[in-house]
Amino acid sequence: MQVGMAIASKGGLVAPCNGRAVLFREYEILCGSVTAFKWIPIQGKFTFKAVVGGKPYVCGQDKKGEPIYAASTTVDGRDYGGMVSVKTKNMIFVREGKEEKAVDYFVLCVVD
């Protein structure tokens, strides 16, 4: 399972995978109460210690089965969705068809 950004003009979900953008035509969207989740800001390397005030919500897994978490960032005034994990260290997202990294980002967390 991957984490990415649903883009209507692309006709699916765009997710970072092995350095490039991959388009998925079939995907799931997380829905629920806005009071159950919150976005917690992170600067730099992702660690559980860096997440204060919530528990990162597992949204997928990498090839080896390691958990990945939803993340978001803003670049040049545009919001991007992507993923982060302990292995990636920073947020990974797709911008203009290429995989990029962000050191300032938000992680989706379950409210404590």
Image (cartoon, rainbow, N blue to C red):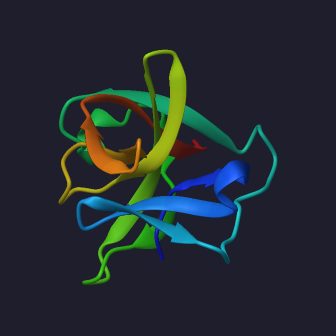
Q: Nearer the viewer, residue 86 or 91?
A: 91
Q: Position of residue 11 (x, y in %)?
A: 70, 62
Q: Position of residue 88 (x, y in %)?
A: 20, 54
Left/right of residue 30 with respect to residue 70 in the rendered view: right
Report the residue at 76% width, 37% height from top.
Answer: 35
* Furthest residue toward bottom: 64
Q: Nearer the viewer, residue 5 or 11?
A: 11
Left/right of residue 89 with respect to residue 29 in the rendered view: left
Q: Position of residue 39 (x, y in %)?
A: 55, 33
* Furthest residue toward top: 77
Total number of numbered discs in the rendering: 0
Quadrant including the C terminus: top right
Left/right of residue 86 with respect to residue 14 in the rendered view: left
From the viewer's perspective, is residue 75 above or below residue 23?
above
From the viewer's perspective, is residue 47 above or below residue 21?
above
Report the residue at 25% width, 40% height from top.
Answer: 101
Report the residue at 53% width, 44% height from top.
Answer: 108
Q: Nearer the viewer, residue 47 or 63?
A: 63
Report the residue at 48% width, 77% height from top.
Answer: 1
Q: Position of residue 72 (x, y in %)?
A: 48, 37
